[in-house]
Amino acid sequence: MPPSNAPAKVEDGPNTTAAAAPAVLFTAFEPSGDAHAAPVIAALKRQRPELRIYAWGGQRMEEAGATIVERSADDGAMGLGAVSRALAVRSQIARIRRWSRTYRVLVHVPVDSPAANFPIAKSMAKAGARVVHLVAPQLWAWGAWRVGKLRRCTSEVLCLLPFEERWFRERQIQARFIGHPVLNRELDEAQVRERAASLPGGSPKIAIFPGSRTQEVRRNIRLLATAFTELQGRHTGMGGLIVAANDEIARLVRRRVPVFPTGLHMTVGGIDAAVRWCDLALAVSGTVTLDVAKQCRPMIGVYRTGIVSWLGAKVILRTPYRLLPNIIAGREIVPEFVPHVGGPGPILHAATELLRDSRRLALQREELSRAVARFRGHDPANEAAESILKFLPHAPATATSASPGTSTEKRRSVR
């Protein structure tokens, strides 16, 4: 649903009872934010069924139990140009501020998207709400100068990466590492094996993950397809699979690469099966690299950009690594070309070096396994819900409902 300056409301308007009742407000402006927030909302509803949860968000958040005030995180939003997107978000921020004057928000949960969420969080904190960030703003990478601003309008930051909790705590910001939902999600092994077995053959097998956003695909798919073609010249019988996130991305891939080289196919969805199927993944930098790491499949990370953006990244970014597995490990365990300027040569070289040396492939698998192990023992949705609930009044005794597997001691800790 493409966003516009006119709100796409599910909630028709306030009534006296609803407006007076304490509420939690989630604000998400990306499809990824919708995905991150939904299981947390579901966990809150399991533990506090009576809780009023409102959201600027998407379909998943609504299905989880939130009352959607306005659509702001659907896929259509990503199709807007930068200027149109900025104007739409600015208009949404103004409407959120107006809405919050009527509804009694006790906790505001901004979900990622710091550029959009920072001004909202500031307003909510000023009005007396507690602010619990779901997905830590990556200030450690690009914006340490904004720490003071974050501190002034934050009650707690919920971190998806292991090192973030310490980083924020050292800067006097309350933080909690809750794990990452991608690495917490259990695979349906039977389904993954069955679908992987149905995919095209070839040896070696190369999976291409071109990104889930149109901008990512436009920038990277031709580069990755060219790298596949040149790599195929060195490996007779090689098979390839482009994994499109959805039908819209699949159509874009076809427009950008009208003719596939022999042996290269495309599938829509089925990321886990494609990861299981492949010997090596060529992945655009992003969360998909964690999907690959989860199954300990060797990969190469790529994100093509222009020279101006490349120079800007060199100046602004404060971390030596851009790819999530490398950031988690604190060193380069996966070859990364992020940002990348130029042709497929470096990618081709890295892929060739990996494919011709089984020891390198095995070493990367071991390193990925160690990185993923740092997330074990965490339940992101329930841990996030615990943090949010501790800022709310006690539930009425008749309405309290613990989630399955939640101990009495754990329930006591969030009240």
Image: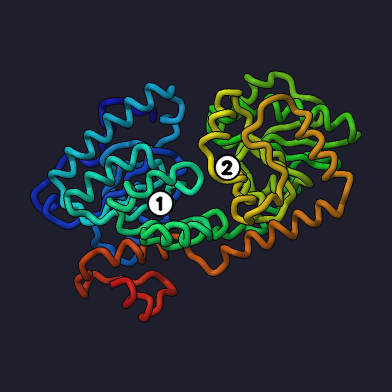
Say which residue label 1 marks: 38
Q: Residues within 10 Å of mark 1 (few under 14, many from 20)?
A: many
Tag 2: Cα neighbours inside 10 Å, few (<14), some, or many (≥20)? some
Give coordinates of residue 274: x percent, y percent: 69, 45
Of badges 1 and 2, nearer the viewer stands 2
Judge left or right: residue 216 versus residue 8.
right
Disc 1 to disc 2, C-alpha distance: 20 Å
Residue 394 disc label: none
Quadrant in which the N terminus is drawn = top left
Element at label 1: helix
Query: Residue visible at 39% across and 22% down?
Result: 83
User: Is residue 81 at least partly visible in the picture?
Assistant: yes
Three-letter amino acid code at the position of disc 1: Ala
Report which residue position mark 2 lands on: 286
Quadrant where the image shows the C terminus: bottom left
Instruction: Answer above or below: position of 393 versus 119.
Output: below
Q: Is residue 34 visible?
A: no
Q: Position of residue 237 (x, y in %)?
A: 89, 35
In the rendered image, the vertical position of residue 81 relative to residue 104, given as above or below:
above
Q: Is residue 200 above or below residue 166?
A: above
Q: Is residue 137 left or right of residue 272?
A: left
Amino acid type at mark 2: Gly
Q: Residue at x 69, y 56 (%)?
A: 368
SS at mark 2 in the image = loop
Q: Is residue 359 left or right of residue 157?
A: right
Q: Residue furthest bottom?
A: 409
Mark before the other along the chain sequence, 1 or 2: 1
Task: In this rendered view, identify the residue nearer to me: 201 or 143.
Answer: 143
Taking the spot 73% from the left edge, 28% from the top edge, the residue there is 225
Q: What is the basis of the colouring in this image?
A: rainbow
